């Protein structure tokens, strides 16, 4: 019993040390998605990116046509860094490092004052769905990271139908190219 407690304590300390030792970055994204992002690395080949902010190009299609407008979003993607062994750091590397990454995850959001083809600008809507990501980043030799990525979202939504009820539909956002600027720590 005593050995089991020592083993559990050792594994807990080791796990906490590994969680703290992973590279992290925090910053913002500008473009079709504007907001804050946090990256947490898992070794050298994986990372989790969490985002909160607003999107300018979300669309929801249902029986009333297509709505579009700004929406508040939360998103998380699990990304693979330099997947398939493709690394171009040794080609363009000066003092920092280049990486490309791709991943999948989930997104959810809420939009207000959406516009329809008929010009109605007072409809509210929400969505939940899958998110993808592909991008390239440059890690400087000082704690700064710049990235450009594309994060499309596809999911199911629920919107006002204009008469006080709600109607389901398909949500998509396929124009989310953004520039990221992050502080690495």
Image (cartoon, grey):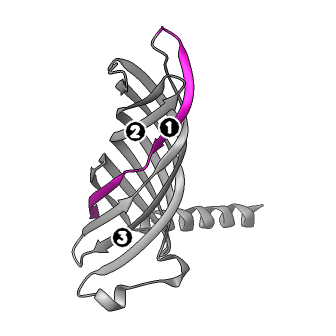
- The front one of 10 and 74 is 74
CB under 8 Å between callouts 2 and 1?
A: yes
Viewer-closest of 63 and 74: 63
Marks 3/1: CA–CA distance: 26 Å
> Image point 48% across, 8% down: which residue?
164
Q: Position of residue 72 (x, y in %)?
A: 37, 35
Q: Where is 143 relative to 113, above or below?
A: below
Question: Where residue 13 appears, x then y in whole percent?
Answer: 54, 64
- Image position of 45 (left or right of 100): right
Closest to the observer, 93 or 144: 93
Q: List x then y, in percent, for residue 70.
A: 33, 34
Tell me whether the residue at label 3 lies in contact with that at label 2, contact meaning CB atoms closer than 8 angstroms. Answer: no
Q: Is residue 171 magenta?
A: yes
Q: Residues within 10 Å of mark 1 (few under 14, many from 20)?
A: many
Q: Is residue 2 magenta?
A: no
Q: Which mark is residue 171?
A: 1
Q: Is residue 17 visible?
A: no
Residue 62, placed above or below residue 153: above
Tell me which numbered mark, 2 or 1, is placed earlier along the sequence.
Answer: 2
Q: Main secondary structure of the magenta part?
A: strand
Q: Which residues are magenta?
A: 163-185
Q: Earlier in the sequence, mark 3 or mark 2?
A: 2
Secondary structure beneath dot 1 equals: strand
- Looking at the rendered structure, the secondary structure element under dot 2 is strand
Q: Which of the labelled discs sits on residue 40, or is there none? A: none
Mark-to-mark CA distance, 3 and 2: 23 Å
Residue at mark 2? 58
Marks 3, 1: nearer the viewer: 1
Residue linked to disc 3 = 136
Quadrant holding the C terminus: bottom left
């Amino acid at each position: 019993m005593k050995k089991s407690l020592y083993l559990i304590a050792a594994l807990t300390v080791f796990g906490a040390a590994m969680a703290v030792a992973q590279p992290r970055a925090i910053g913002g994204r500008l473009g079709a998605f504007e907001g804050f992002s946090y990256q947490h690395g898992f070794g050298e080949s994986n990372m989790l990116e969490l985002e909160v902010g607003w999107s300018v190009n979300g669309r929801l299609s249902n029986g009333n046509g297509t709505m579009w407008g700004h929406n508040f979003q939360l998103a998380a993607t699990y990304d693979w860094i330099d997947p398939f062994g493709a690394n171009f750091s040794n080609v363009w590397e000066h003092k920092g490092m280049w990486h490309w990454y791709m991943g999948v995850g989930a997104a959810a959001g809420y939009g207000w004052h959406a516009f329809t083809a008929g010009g109605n600008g007072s409809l509210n809507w929400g969505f939940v769905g899958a998110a993808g990501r592909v991008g390239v980043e440059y890690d400087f030799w000082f704690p700064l990271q710049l990235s450009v990525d594309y994060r499309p979202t596809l999911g199911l939504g629920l919107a006002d139908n204009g008469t006080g009820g709600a109607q389901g539909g398909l949500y998509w956002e396929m124009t989310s190219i953004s520039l990221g600027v992050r502080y690495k720590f």
